[in-house]
Amino acid sequence: MRRVRYLIIAFAFVLGQQGSAAQVKLRASLQVAVSEPYLGVPLVQFKEEVEKRSNKAITIEIIDKGKLYIDTEVVGGIASGAVEMGVAGTYQFAKKIPEITFVEQPFLFNFEALVRAATSPDGEIRKLIDKTVLEVMGVRVLWWQPVGGSVFFSRGKDVSEPHAIKGQKVRVFSHITAQLTTHCGGRPTIISTSKMHDAMKSGAVDLAMGSITSVEPRELWKVADTVTQTDHVPIEFLLLVNERLWQSLSPDHKAVIVEAARAVERVARDRFAENEASAYAFAREKGMQIHTPTPDQVAEWRACSAGVLEEYMSQGGELGRLLLAAYGRLRTDPCCRAAPTFGPFNRH
């Protein structure tokens, strides 16, 4: 009888251990507040979806406001396993995967339908990049989400004409945006998004390049009064998970996370235009002047920055070749054959 009792106790212990092992707790690093509508709110929705779909067998703790890692540190933290998940811009991979800068090439992805098609989970460009990120960095991409096209923030003047940045100190966020700035006459400095406000306030930079969605969370209206809507580079962020952790999950848990990520990604992409319009409205409410370059001025920006793509094409490896070929095929698709027309050209 005593032996039976021991067996029952041992069996109960094993069941308890299995139940404990089935419970998954993940932490996600976020640079902004969870209330921020462009990166924060979607991550909260993802957390809620995962916990709901798994009946809380999987729980996610979001560590926001850069308390764990600032934007330049997130990828390294996830790759090392120090944190399980996090959100990072595509440009944070450029040092290890130079070809990924393809998505930042000036004016290459210059309208929403083209960006949407390129970043679709089933799209050729997205699949090539996700696969390479996994193989090189050891992190798995769960979603892509837009935070807005690149713009210039300045004080007292707009920079619709590229010569307006000549000799100016410009905050940039990546190697490619630094190249663009140099080609067009500016003096670039790569500064973390979290430090952009202070750099403008102190005069460390004269202009700042970033997304319009940064205005509210970074309080940029306090240090800048003008936005020039060049939209020269689409800024995309990725939700990442450590691959070793991913492989330790059960098939059911993986399915829950993937399904939740896909659901939230679709919503975020569909709401992108609305969110960006809200960010511009907020900037106007704070007294910021919004300037949109004419087609002629955009042509000037394209001309001065053309060398960036030329360098990419001459230096890109096999992945760069594959991405360029995929882009060429995408531009023959009905979705992406021609960009919207914004007006006539008047300069000759």
Image: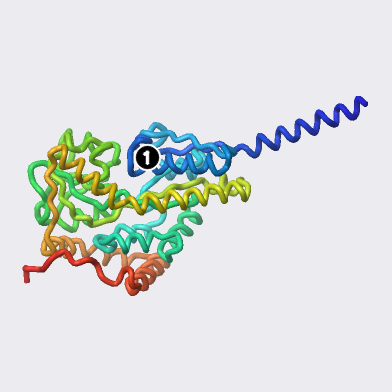
Image quarter in which the C terminus is found: bottom left
Residue 224 horizontal/vertical position (percent): 15, 39
In depth, the one of 107 and 176 nearer the eye is: 107
The residue that appears at 61% across and 49% down in the rendered structure is: 252
Relative placement, left or right, of 338 versus 44 is: left
Image quarter in which the N terminus is found: top right
The residue that appears at 81% across and 28% down in the rendered structure is: 9
Q: Residue furthest top?
A: 2
Q: Residues within 10 Å of mark 1 (few under 14, many from 20)?
A: some
Which of the colour schemes (rainbow, by chain, secondary structure, one colour) is used? rainbow
Residue 223 horizontal/vertical position (percent): 16, 36
Relative placement, left or right, of 114 versus 238 is: left
In this view, 209 is above or below 162? above
In depth, the one of 60 and 190 nearer the eye is: 60
> Which of the 4 quarters of the picture holds residue 282?
top left
Q: Is any atom of residue 226 visible in this view?
A: yes
Q: Would you name the residue on which mark 1 appears?
A: 40
Q: How many marks?
A: 1
The amino acid sitting under disc 1 is: Gly
The residue that appears at 39% across and 41% down in the rendered structure is: 73
In depth, the one of 29 and 169 nearer the eye is: 29
Residue 165 horizontal/vertical position (percent): 12, 51
> Which of the 4 quarters of the picture holds residue 199?
top left
> Which of the 4 quarters of the picture holds residue 317?
bottom left
The residue that appears at 26% across and 48% down in the rendered structure is: 276
Residue 150 horizontal/vertical position (percent): 24, 51
Relative placement, left or right, of 317 versus 14 is: left
| Circle 1: element type | helix
